[in-house]
Image (cartoon, rainbow, N blue to C red):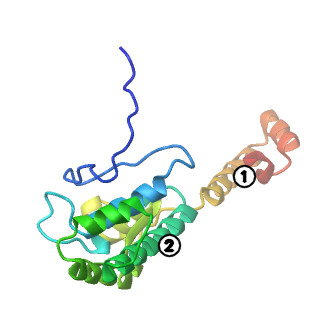
Amino acid sequence: MSEPQARPFDLMGHPLQDGFTLVEASAGTGKTYTITNLYLRLLLGESKTQKRLLRVNEILVLTFTNAATDELRRKIRERIIKARDLFREPALETSDIFLTHLRSASTDLQADAKVLSAAVQLMDEAAIFTIHGFCNKIINEYPFECGIPGKFQLSQNLDDELADLVRQEWRKLIRRGTKVDYYLEHLFESPEKMVE
């Protein structure tokens, strides 16, 4: 059986009707550009199944790191502002093929500019999270539905938890005083060395 062939992503024509779009690719391939433009399409109601326009807190964007989350939030905001300005001033020229496409597809440039202005104002509420940040939000907002005790929090720094567990085990080993413990004590010197 042969592996599926990769095909170029059609940013302007990709259907947004499934309710989600997974964008994964190697570094430097344009993921952020793709996500920011898909975000614009969703804000402007380009999904064939959307019954109404989506607000920024209704479009979920997940990524792996806090740095990527901050970058996406900033780039999405910048992209919305650029699109809004182009929609407000139809005489403005741009070499941006995607924004040219969006502007030409608009049936009401001023209404779309207002939608984008509102989105810029609400960007602090945008649902852009790391995967663990989103999980933490859901657990905190819906603990009963998740079957989680109240005030549960996902750890963002597993190194601290690992070090605590190693220290606990270290104490148990040292208390036992067996020959294995002697070697562990001399090989690792401390719990911190064991964690390393």
Residue positioned most to the right: 186
Q: Residue at x 41, y 78 (%)?
A: 81
Find disc 1 in the rendering and name its residue.
171
Find disc 2 in the rendering and name its residue.
74
- Amino acid tagged 1: Arg
Q: Is residue 9 left or right of residue 185?
A: left
Location of residue 122 by image quarter: bottom left
In the image, is residue 160 above or below residue 182? below
Camera-side residue of 128 and 43: 43
Label 1 and label 2: CA atoms lie apart by 47 Å
Q: Quadrant of the N terminus?
A: top left
Other residues around mark 2 within 10 Å, as few (<14) / some (14–19) / many (≥20): few
Camera-side residue of 78 and 153: 78
* Numbered disc 1: secondary structure: helix
* Numbered disc 2: secondary structure: helix
Camera-side residue of 109 and 158: 109
Q: Residue at x 40, y 32 (%)?
A: 6
How many marks overall?
2
Residue 120 appears in view: yes
Other residues around mark 1 within 10 Å, as few (<14) / some (14–19) / many (≥20): few
Q: Is residue 116 left or right of residue 34?
A: left
Residue 44, position as x, y percentages in the image: 24, 69
Residue positioned most to the top: 1
